[in-house]
Amino acid sequence: MIESNKLYTDIYAFSQEIIAENVRSLDLLKDTVPTLSQLGRMAAQMTADTAFAGKAIIAIQELNIQIDVDGAISGKLQQAQSYTNQLCDALGQMCSMTQQNGSMAENSTEQAFTHAITAADNLHNILGLLQISVSEPIQTPEEIVTKFFVV
């Protein structure tokens, strides 16, 4: 029981952190075209968040119990997923706009956008799986891994 309570707390806090980070990133994208460094940091953070979510899903599977009995985590994860989707869309629009303006002369800029968009898409997908897992742990870790990675 203690382990499931800790997992509940960790996942709830994790979802709040993702929301805050995505709001910050969306704010950044409103004002300016992100630098290569900013895109790299966004992608790295989302990749780390994806890894954490994957580990949380595996931990839930190992406990094999419903973690989110009151629905609070599911609500926060849904918000986090929504903000991640908004970020993915904003990055895609910013990438297209940058290409159309001709300001994406460097191949590294296009790669940085692609990497950040892929990281956002991966995070979005695994947040959906995590939301399902906290309510009803039904998938094996192998099934989960094959469903959410975008290559």
Image: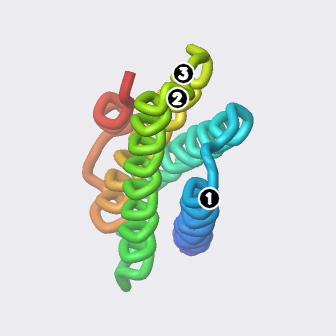
Q: In the rendered view, tell whether residue 96 sits above or below residue 16.
A: above
Distance in Å between CA atoms under marks 2 and 1: 21 Å
* Mark carried by residue 98: none
* Residue 116, image x, y percentages: 53, 36
SS at badge 1:
helix
Q: Earlier in the sequence, mark 2 or mark 1?
A: 1
Q: Quadrant of the C terminus?
A: top left
Residue with the mark numbered 2: 115
Rendered image quadrant of residue 40: top right
Label 3 with label 2: CB-CB less than 8 Å = yes
Which of label 3 and label 2 is nearer to you? 3
Residue with the mark numbered 3: 111
Q: Earlier in the sequence, mark 3 or mark 1?
A: 1
Q: At 50% across and 25% down in the image, what residue appears?
A: 102
Task: Return the residue nearer the eye: 119 or 77.
Answer: 119
Rendered image quadrant of residue 42: top right
The outermost residue toward the right is: 37
SS at badge 3:
helix
Residue with the mark numbered 1: 31
Amino acid type, residue under disc 2 in the picture: His
Q: At 56% across and 14% down in the image, what residue appears?
A: 107
Distance in Å between CA atoms under marks 3 and 2: 6 Å
* Residue 36, image x, y percentages: 68, 32
Q: At 44% across and 74% down in the image, what residue appears?
A: 76
**Residue count near mark 3 (Cα–Cα under 10 Å), binned few <14, some 14–19, many ≥20:** some
Q: At 54% across and 72% down in the image, what residue appears?
A: 12
Which of label 2 and label 1 is nearer to you? 1
Q: Looking at the image, can residue 10 be seen?
A: no
Q: Is residue 36 left or right of residue 137?
A: right
